Amino acid sequence: MVAASIIIPSYNRPDRLDECLSACVQQDDTDYEIVVVDDGSPRPLDEICQKVGDRVRCIRQENSGAGPARNRGVAEARGEFLAFTDDDCRPHKSWLKTLRAAHSDDPTRLVGGYVINGLPENIYSSVSQDLCDYLYDYFGAADGDISFFTTNNKACTRSSFMDISGFDPVFPGAGAEDRDFGMRWRESGKHLYYEPGALVDHYHAMTLASFLRQHRNYGRGARILHKQLDKRDAPSVKVEPFRFYRDLILHPLRKYGVSGAPRSFLMGITQVAMIAGYGKTVLEEKWSSS
């Protein structure tokens, strides 16, 4: 048995996974394992995992999506403490130890850390991280008021994870499954705790096409989330006031000055793409029911 398990879902990104595992095996903590869930990659990821060492186990399954892959990782994990990251991330050496220390005061906490964009020269990757930073600030992560943490940097106990039945497999891909998880966590009476000292570098290379696709997927996920909330009679997601969207678009300008103008433009595009994804999902529902 080990005290902690690092869970990493991965699909068809062997180079990124290799870099992620190289960072994970250098943790200051010592009592942990790494569980990689190969989510049906065309070329199995076993070799990548094996060359890192005995600390890593690779579980292969049919392609099911990131949420189900994380659930499978938890089912196979030997540790009571679960730390989640993604294959395009590189946790800092103190990451796991910092998450465990932040969790020690309250075993029912969902602890989230801070994510750093590892590709500052990529404007699309930078804007995506700017958006996350804005949401963490706006929803009060530092004050404990936020209702979600991104899935590439958070941790909890196995027992608390099982209390809410893990990640809901209804979400087809990256898009709102983290919000749903956090909201169900709070609905169960547990708390979210932000620990900005738990650091992960995120190397998510993006093009304009993948940037738009990601934010359309967020809109699609938002629609699914709203339907799930209705099913369980949970409080619906409130519509944020105008100032939320105004400040979101202005956030890069205020942070970087005039040089942030292209980022502000793209920040506005994220909202257009999300609305498009949400609306397309609504139309698909109507077509399928007619």
Image (cartoon, rainbow, N blue to C red):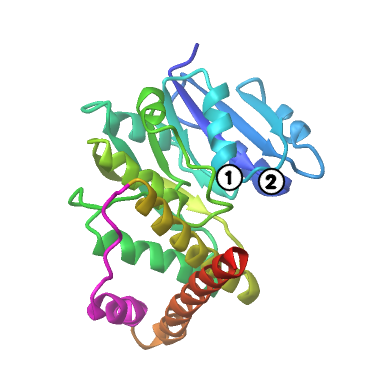
Q: Amino acid at mark 1?
A: Ala
Secondary structure, mark 1, is helix
Residue 257 in the figure: left or right of residue 27: left
Q: Where is mark 1, residue-wise?
A: 66
Residue 134 visible from this viewpoint: yes
Bounds of the magenta span? Answer: 233-256
Q: In the figure, is residue 178 to the left or right of 235?
A: right
Cβ atoms at labels 2 and 1 below 8 Å apart: yes
Q: What residue lies at 29% left-to-right and 49% top-to-bottom? A: 234
* Residue 86: percent from left, percent from top: 55, 45
Q: Nearer the viewer, residue 212 or 25?
A: 212
Q: Nearer the viewer, residue 181 or 36?
A: 181
- Residue 239 lies in the magenta-colored region: yes
Q: Residue at x 72, y 45 (%)?
A: 14
Q: Residues within 10 Å of mark 1 (few under 14, many from 20)?
A: many
Q: Residue furthest left?
A: 143
Q: Per the image, is 112 magenta?
A: no
Secondary structure of residue under mark 2: loop
Q: Residue at x 67, y 41 (%)?
A: 18
Q: Which residue is at the far front? A: 290
The mark nearer the N terminus, 2 or 1, is 2
The residue at which mark 2 appears reads as 11
Residue 213 falls left or right of residue 275:
right
Residue at mark 2 to residue at mark 1: CA–CA distance: 9 Å
Specify the amino acid type for callout 2.
Answer: Tyr
Report the predominant secondary structure element of the magenta stretch: helix
Q: Residue at x 63, y 69 (%)?
A: 210
Whether 58 is drawn above or below 65: the answer is above
